């Protein structure tokens, strides 16, 4: 067995010696880039009051893709008013069945234009086309399709209640799954009968803006969805606006706390989907090859820019060495580079700022005594890149075991007993997700019960579905997205049915 | 005292922490008057340190209580109702005196408090089915979502409804397996302490409910900022203290239920005074995925 592993180990890096893949770039010619973009307010594309804009780039080439408007307080105010007016005059008067039909239309239109959106997502965000094509787009469409069906069935979702919409929802979304997060936010909000002001992340505005155009083509009534581009200040102005009835945020725990403070004492409904430091727990009886694939998917999916990434590998001591060896061999086969190439596994880091943060934490890991190993791959000369990295000899107190790195960096810790695994898994302020790999059903159920996390993947990792509630325990936030539970976040359930 | 008359034995009202009845570590007390303004008894003026002790006791009790079967928790809550019923007369006296209501209204209030425990007892083994789900994901996975208790909950009891209001907020917090630290009504704390005596004799494990008396302005801050508290029910909190409490709560992203305004009448009403969604406010939803056929 050991011999076999050795031989395979020798063979793995062979692709660097001639078994490489030919380039297979996805065509971009059907994506017409617009030079500049306004704000979508009340059904019209308008210039920001300040006239300010900023450039958005491709993180893979650092090439400027477009100029994007920067919304200020006046624009926020205008968008909230537009959303309010659309709510009172149009959207709250429509029947659930009619709202449903709009959402079905949106789902269908996204499916029809999936390729265009996937390419644009990859250009602007740096994620591999394989993922934007096979994960982000299908899931985004599925979210609209799923929630469409709820719009006229809300009375059945909450026993003993007469659900009512809240009014205007302010939604601030992150850059790691730009379109998908927009879908996660918009679909339940609209199904529940709210209107929305959406703010995409500053580095990845383009698919949200194109979604705005798609909503217009679907003839969604004006002002039901308003889209404001901008950075942190725009988001802060939006979530702090008095005319907003509900705030939903996905992003860092730090910003989430700031938003909770902003809303303190207001009684406004808030849901937060924040950071994570998930444990991916592998027991000695786990099918190791499957587990390795799960670990790879857990941490290197989307460059590790995933709040629920399996960034802490907890491996049972008895199999730690062979597992880490297998893992390194597999890592050596990961193709890092042009995200538009259909063979690429790991694309570009989303921004220079994020790359700096990853580099800082990796340096801290080395300084604190952990041992880093990086896949021996070549990186393009332009753009933002980081080699898939694994740290061994990691202690629980290390920053790389406590802080969210949000990059392709895995920290390996070991355990001996299930109790120790649980204790280590729960030993962070976060509680978003966890993975368990074992052949033993009773152990899966025990671990799934004892880890304090909102999503537990057993013998799999990073699976998402609109019917499956997603969200965190502890400092990973509160509220759920998806399923009946996600719907509740956008409804007033105070009235008895 | 006239000859032949018996001198009554007065009760010392203390805190309830970890299943025991300690005095406040601060040694302080404050005078509690009845509804007519007549001095009634001294209550403990709990301190920041008492809050910390209470949170520690609540955390210690969490694994056992959350790990108990739903059937068991239901029976324990029902046992609380039994014990409360047995001491009905004592509570009628105390509620009448604390709230300045007639004995008839006080009796109605105590009866409703008993019934409320019974109502929530029945929820223990229903809430998973009502608030959980099996999820039809688009792939070969067995997928379900189950509610779990949030952890340690800080409860600020309603100020006016000293017994029924407290029971109505406390039962939905603990029925799912949460443990808690309660700040009793500041001006009417005595029925709460007497309730703690009921809890202590109801098979409820020590530390599941910890009850502090004292000044809300002094106790809510440390409770709201305590990093081992996962959620706050500010149902009974004065609006003036709400913002500050929620500001502190953000430090570890606590789930916060805002103040509610219910009158004494409202608490007596089943439509307004009891609600399964108050249980849901202190639940976390856990989604579990497992491949099928692999």
Image (cartoon, rainbow, N blue to C red):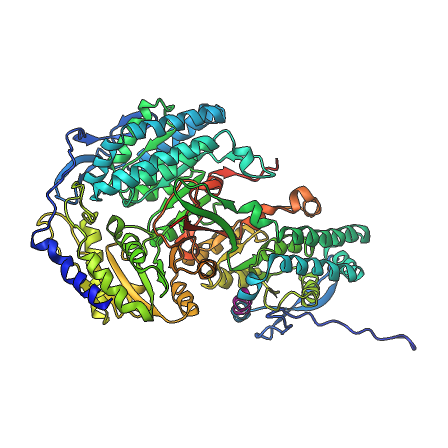
Span highlighted in magenta in the image = B54-62
B30 left or right of A415 in image: right
* Rendered location of residue B272, percent (x, y): 65, 43
| Residue toward you, B226 or A26 | A26
Q: Is residue B160 visible?
A: no
* Rendered location of residue B180, percent (x, y): 56, 61
Is A103 rendered above or below residue B6? above
At 57% across and 74% down in the image, what residue appears?
B26
Image quadrant of residue B81? bottom right
At 35% across and 22% down in the image, what residue appears?
A219
| Residue toward you, B248 or A132 | A132
Image quadrant of residue B34? bottom right
Q: Is residue A337 visible?
A: yes
For the view shown, which residue lies furthest in the bottom direction? B3
Magenta: main secondary structure: helix
For the view shown, which residue lies furthest in the right direction? B4
B112 left or right of A38 in image: right
* Rendered location of residue A486, percent (x, y): 45, 42
Is B133 rendered above or below residue B72? above
The quadrant of the rendering that contains the C terminus of chain A is top right
| Image mark count | 0
The quadrant of the rendering that contains the N terminus of chain A is bottom left
| Residue toward you, A155 or B107 | A155
Q: Is residue B49 magenta?
A: no
Q: Is residue B58 magenta?
A: yes
At 30% across and 50% down in the image, what residue appears?
A306
* Rendered location of residue B54, percent (x, y): 55, 68
């Amino acid at each position: 067995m050991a011999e076999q592993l050795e031989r395979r180990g020798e063979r793995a890096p062979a692709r660097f010696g001639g078994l490489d893949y030919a380039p297979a770039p996805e065509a971009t010619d059907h994506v017409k880039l617009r030079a500049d973009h306004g704000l979508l307010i009340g059904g019209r594309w308008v210039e920001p009051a300040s006239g300010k804009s900023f450039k958005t780039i491709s993180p893979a080439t650092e090439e400027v893709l477009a100029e994007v408007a920067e919304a200020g307080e006046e624009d926020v105010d205008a968008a909230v008013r537009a959303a309010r007016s659309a709510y009172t005059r149009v959207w709250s008067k429509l029947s659930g069945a009619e709202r449903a039909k709009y959402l079905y239309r949106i789902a269908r239109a996204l499916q029809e234009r999936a390729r265009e959106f996937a390419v644009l997502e990859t250009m602007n965000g740096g994620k591999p086309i394989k993922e934007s094509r096979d994960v982000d787009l299908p899931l985004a469409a599925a979210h609209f399709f799923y929630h469409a069906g709820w719009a006229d069935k809300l009375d059945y979702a909450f026993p003993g209640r007469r659900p009512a919409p809240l009014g205007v929802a302010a939604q601030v979304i992150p850059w790691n799954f730009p379109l998908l997060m927009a879908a996660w936010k918009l679909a339940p909000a609209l199904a529940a009968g709210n209107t929305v002001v959406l703010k995409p992340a500053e580095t990845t505005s383009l698919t949200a803006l194109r979604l705005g155009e798609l909503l217009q083509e679907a003839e969604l009534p004006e002002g039901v969805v308003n889209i404001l581009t901008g950075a942190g200040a725009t988001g802060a102005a939006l979530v702090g606006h008095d005319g907003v009835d509900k705030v939903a945020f996905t992003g860092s725990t730090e910003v989430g706390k700031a938003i909770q403070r902003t809303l303190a004492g207001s009684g406004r409904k808030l849901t937060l989907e924040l950071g994570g430091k998930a444990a991916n727990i592998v027991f000695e009886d786990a099918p190791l090859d499957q587990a390795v694939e799960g670990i790879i998917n857990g941490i290197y999916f989307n460059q590790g820019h995933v709040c629920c990434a399996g960034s802490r590998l907890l491996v049972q001591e008895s199999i730690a060495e062979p597992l880490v060896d297998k893992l390194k061999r597999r890592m050596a086969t990961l193709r890092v580079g042009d995200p538009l190439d259909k063979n690429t596994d790991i694309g570009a880091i989303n921004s220079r700022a994020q790359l700096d943060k990853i580099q800082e934490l990796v340096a801290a890991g080395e300084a604190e005594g952990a041992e880093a190993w990086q896949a021996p791959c070549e990186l393009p000369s332009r753009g933002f890149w980081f080699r898939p990295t694994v740290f061994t000899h990691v202690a629980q107190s290390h920053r790389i075991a406590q802080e969210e790195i949000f990059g392709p960096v895995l920290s390996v810790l070991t355990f001996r007993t299930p109790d120790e695994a649980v204790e280590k898994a729960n030993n962070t302020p976060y509680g978003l997700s966890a993975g368990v790999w074992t052949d033993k059903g009773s152990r899966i159920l025990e671990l799934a019960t004892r880890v304090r996390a909102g999503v537990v993947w057993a013998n799999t990792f990073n699976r998402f579905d609109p019917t499956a509630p997603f969200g965190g325990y502890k400092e990973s936030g509160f509220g759920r997205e998806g399923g009946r539970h996600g719907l509740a976040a956008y409804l007033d359930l105070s009235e008895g049915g | 005292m006239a000859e032949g008359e018996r001198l009554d034995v007065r009760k010392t009202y203390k805190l309830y922490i970890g299943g025991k009845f300690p005095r406040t570590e601060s040694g302080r007390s404050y005078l509690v008057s009845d509804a007519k303004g007549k001095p009634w008894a001294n209550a403990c003026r709990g301190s920041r340190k008492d809050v910390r002790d209470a949170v520690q006791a609540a955390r210690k009790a969490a694994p056992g209580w959350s790990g108990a079967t739903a059937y068991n928790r239901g029976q324990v809550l029902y046992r609380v109702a039994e014990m409360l019923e047995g001491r009905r007369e004592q509570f009628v006296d105390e509620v009448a005196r604390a709230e300045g209501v007639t004995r008839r209204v006080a009796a109605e209030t105590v009866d409703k408090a008993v019934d409320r425990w019974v109502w929530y007892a029945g929820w223990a083994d229903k809430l998973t089915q009502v608030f959980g789900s099996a999820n039809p994901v688009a792939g070969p996975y067995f997928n379900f979502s189950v509610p779990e208790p949030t952890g340690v909950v800080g409860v600020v009891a309603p100020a006016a409804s000293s017994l029924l209001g407290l029971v109505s907020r406390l039962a939905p917090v603990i029925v799912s397996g949460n443990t808690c630290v309660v700040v009793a009504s500041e001006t009417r704390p005595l029925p709460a302490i007497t309730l703690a005596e009921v809890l202590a004799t109801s098979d409820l494990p020590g530390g599941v409910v910890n009850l502090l008396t004292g000044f809300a302005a002094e106790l809510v801050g440390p409770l709201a900022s305590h990093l081992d508290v996962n959620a706050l029910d500010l149902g009974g909190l004065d609006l003036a203290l709400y913002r500050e409490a929620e500001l502190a709560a953000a430090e570890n992203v606590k789930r916060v239920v805002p103040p509610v305004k219910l009158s004494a009448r409202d608490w007596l009403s089943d439509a307004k005074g009891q609600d399964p969604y108050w249980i849901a406010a202190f639940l976390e939803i856990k989604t579990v995925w497992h491949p099928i056929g692999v």
